[in-house]
Image (spheres, rainbow, N blue to C red):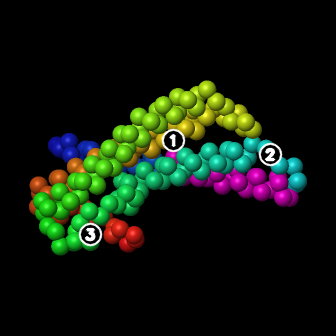
Amino acid sequence: MTRPAERSGGALDLLLRINAALAVVLFAALTVVVALQVLTRFVLHIPFIWSEEVARFLFFWTVLLGAAMSVRSRRHFVLDIGMGRRAVTGGAARVILDLVPHLCVLAFSVLLFVLGIDYARAGLLRTATNSNVDMGLVFAAVPVFAALTFVYTVGNLLADVRGLRSGRPPADQPAPGGE
């Protein structure tokens, strides 16, 4: 029988796969729209006026989905409160040093989710000028990103705590400023 902690890792991995698949589909659509834009503007000299707008919206969604994925893989929000001493810190002290950044990211994602919902609601009253895309759909990327960031950060935090309880070191994060 699987424990809830093991199931949550599977659920998070499934969510990550769905997130990645959606990001890939949106990036492919972005590539097609930009290629079409170049073809119609510079080769055919009959540009589609909607293509630049749609490309921008697809880019916005792709970036935010990718940013959420990097939170899950611990490659995005890195707050080094140990001033580079993380490797020499062991066990409980390391989890405590990791707890502060996790809590900061959680607070940020909650705030962004609340504000993003309001932003998306305001977008429901607007339509893009050239493409007639509902701006609520575009602005919904903000609360989606915030929700994914929250879920992935909670998963990372729980994995660190489980690792501490089982005697394994917490999962490594990249060093600030690179790998």
Residue toward you, 32 or 173: 173
Q: Is residue 89 visible?
A: yes
Question: Three-letter amino acid code at disc 2?
Answer: Phe
Q: CB under 8 Å between callouts 2 and 1?
A: no
Q: Please, is residue 80 above or below residue 21 in the view?
A: below
Q: Secondary structure at mark 3?
A: loop
Horizontal arrangement in the rendering, residue 77 relative to residue 164 (left or right): right
In primary-sequence order, the first of circles 2 and 1 is: 2
Q: Residues within 10 Å of mark 3 (few under 14, many from 20)?
A: few
Front of the two marks 3 and 1: 3
Residue bearing the label numbered 3: 83
* Residue 4 part of the magenta segment: no
Residue toward you, 179 or 115: 115
Looking at the rendered image, the quarter that the C terminus falls into is bottom left
Q: Residues within 10 Å of mark 2 (few under 14, many from 20)?
A: some
Query: CA separation, marks 2 and 3?
Result: 51 Å
Q: Secondary structure at mark 1?
A: helix
Q: Position of residue 176 (x, y in %)?
A: 35, 68
Question: Three-letter amino acid code at disc 1?
Answer: Ala
Provide the major secondary structure of the magenta segment: helix
The span picked out in magenta is 21-43
Q: Position of residue 123 (x, y in %)?
A: 58, 32
Q: CB under 8 Å between callouts 2 and 3?
A: no
Q: Position of residue 35 (x, y in %)?
A: 73, 56
Residue bearing the label numbered 2: 48
Q: CB under 8 Å between callouts 3 and 1?
A: no
Q: Residue at 58% of width from left, 28% of height from top? A: 124
Residue bearing the label numbered 1: 141
In primary-sequence order, the first of circles 2 and 3 is: 2
Q: Please, is residue 8 above or below residue 97 in the view?
A: above
Q: Position of residue 75 (x, y in %)?
A: 38, 61
